[in-house]
Image (tube, grey):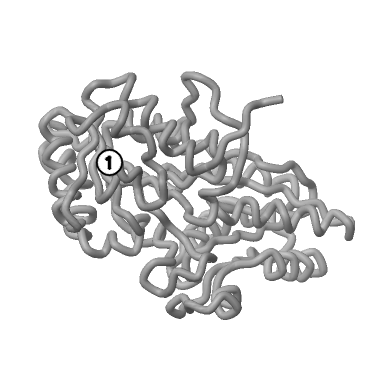
Amino acid sequence: MADLTTYRDAVADGIARELRRDPTVVCLGEDIGAAGGVFKTTVGLFEEFGAERVWDTPISEQAIMGAAMGAAMTGMRPVAEIMFSDFLACCWDYLANEIPKARYMTGGQVTVPLVVRTANGGGLGFGAQHSQSVENWVMTVPGLKIAAPSTPSDVVGLMASAIRSDDPVVVFEHKGLLASKGEAAPPEYVVPLGEARIAREGSDVTVVALAATVPLALAAAADLDAEGISLEVIDLRCLIPLDMATVLASLEKTSRLVVVEENPFQGGWGATVASIVADEGFEMLDAPVRRVAGENVPLPFADALEQQVIPTVAKLVEEVRRLTAY
C-alpha cells in the first residue's frame, strides 16, 4: 500500500526537495516563513532552511515579483508565492511584460528561471476577488509556462520540473484540492512539463480536464458508468506546453470530446483545445466539441450561487448525455 499524503503537504515536500537539491533555490512570499503560509503549504521550510532561503515579504505583489525577477537574473532560482491567483493582477506588468520577455530580448544572455506559485480556483465561498480561476490570463502571455497539478504526486513532480526550468513557470495550486489525499511521490520524482496523463481509460467520450476538474470528471465518469457510457479522462497537467497529441490520440478512439474548465467560458483555455481539435482532428469527430466552463460573471460568495457559476459533476454529466445522443 503506497503512502498517502495531502495535496497541501505535497507542495511543501516538492519545494523542500528542490531546496535540498540545489542551493540556488530560494522561496519568497507573504507569511511563508514561520507561519507556514496562509494555506499551510510551506510548513517546515523555514525551520529546515532558515531565513536566508525562505524570505517573508511585505504585502506587495509587485515587490515579491520584482525581487524574484532580480534574483533569477543574477543566478538564483526563486520560488515566489502570490497568495491568491486573483492578485496576479497586482503585479501583471512584471508577469506579462518583463519576466517572460527578458530572455528573448537579450538573445539568451539573461535567463529568468523563476517559479510563481499561486492558489487558484473557486468552490469554497471565498467571494469574487479570491476565487477566480485565471489560468486563461496567463495563457495569453508568450514566454510563460503553466502547470496545474491535480494530485499530490503531480504537485511534487511538476514542481521539480518548474523549478529546474530555465524559463519562468506559473504553478497553479487549486485551493479546493489542498485537503485531498493521494499517493505520495517517490524519491527523485519528476513530471516533465507538457505531458498529459490519462487519468481514466474509456471508449465513448474524451473529457479533457485540469486541476480540480480532474476529480470532477472522474466522479462524472463513475456516475455515467451505470448508464453504459464510458468516459476517458485526460488530465492536461500543463497548459503551456500543451499536450494535444494525447488529446488527439484519445479522440481517435472515442470520436467525441468535452472540455471541462473552471475559468470563464469567454476566452477560456478550452477554446484553444477546441480550436486545435477543429484544425487537426475534425475528421475524427462524430459530434460537436462541447465545453463545460465557468459562467462570465463575478463569482458569488453564497455557496448555492457559486455552484451555479462553476462547473459541477451534474453539469458535466448532462453535457455528456447530450453529446452521446447527438
Mark 1 residue element: loop
Side (left or right) of 25 relative to 185 = left
- The count of marks equals 1
Who is closer to the viewer here, 224 or 67? Answer: 67
Side (left or right) of 220 relative to 310 = right
Q: Hey, which quadrant is residue 62 in on the image?
A: bottom left
Residue at image location 60% in from the left, 41% down from the top: 246
Up the image or down, 178 lies above or below 158; here it is below
Inspect this view and state whether residue 128 appears: yes
Quadrant in the picture for the N terminus: top right
Inspect this view and state whether residue 283 appears: no
Up the image or down, 216 lies above or below 46; here it is below
Quadrant in the picture for the C terminus: bottom right
Amino acid on which disc 1 is placed = Gly
Side (left or right) of 205 relative to 126 = right
10 Å neighbourhood of mark 1: few (<14), some, or many (≥20)?
many
Residue at image location 55% in from the left, 45% down from the top: 150
**Place of residue 80 in the rendered image (x, y in percent of width and height, measured from the top left):** 26, 44
Residue holding disc 1: 33
Q: Hey, which quadrant is residue 83 in on the image?
A: bottom left
Residue at image location 54% in from the left, 51% down from the top: 177
Up the image or down, 75 lies above or below 270; here it is above
**Place of residue 55 in the rendered image (x, y in percent of width and height, measured from the top left):** 20, 40
Up the image or down, 77 lies above or below 85; here it is above
**Place of residue 54 in the rendered image (x, y in percent of width and height, measured from the top left):** 24, 35
Who is closer to the viewer here, 25 or 204? Answer: 25
**Place of residue 318 in the rendered image (x, y in percent of width and height, measured from the top left):** 74, 70
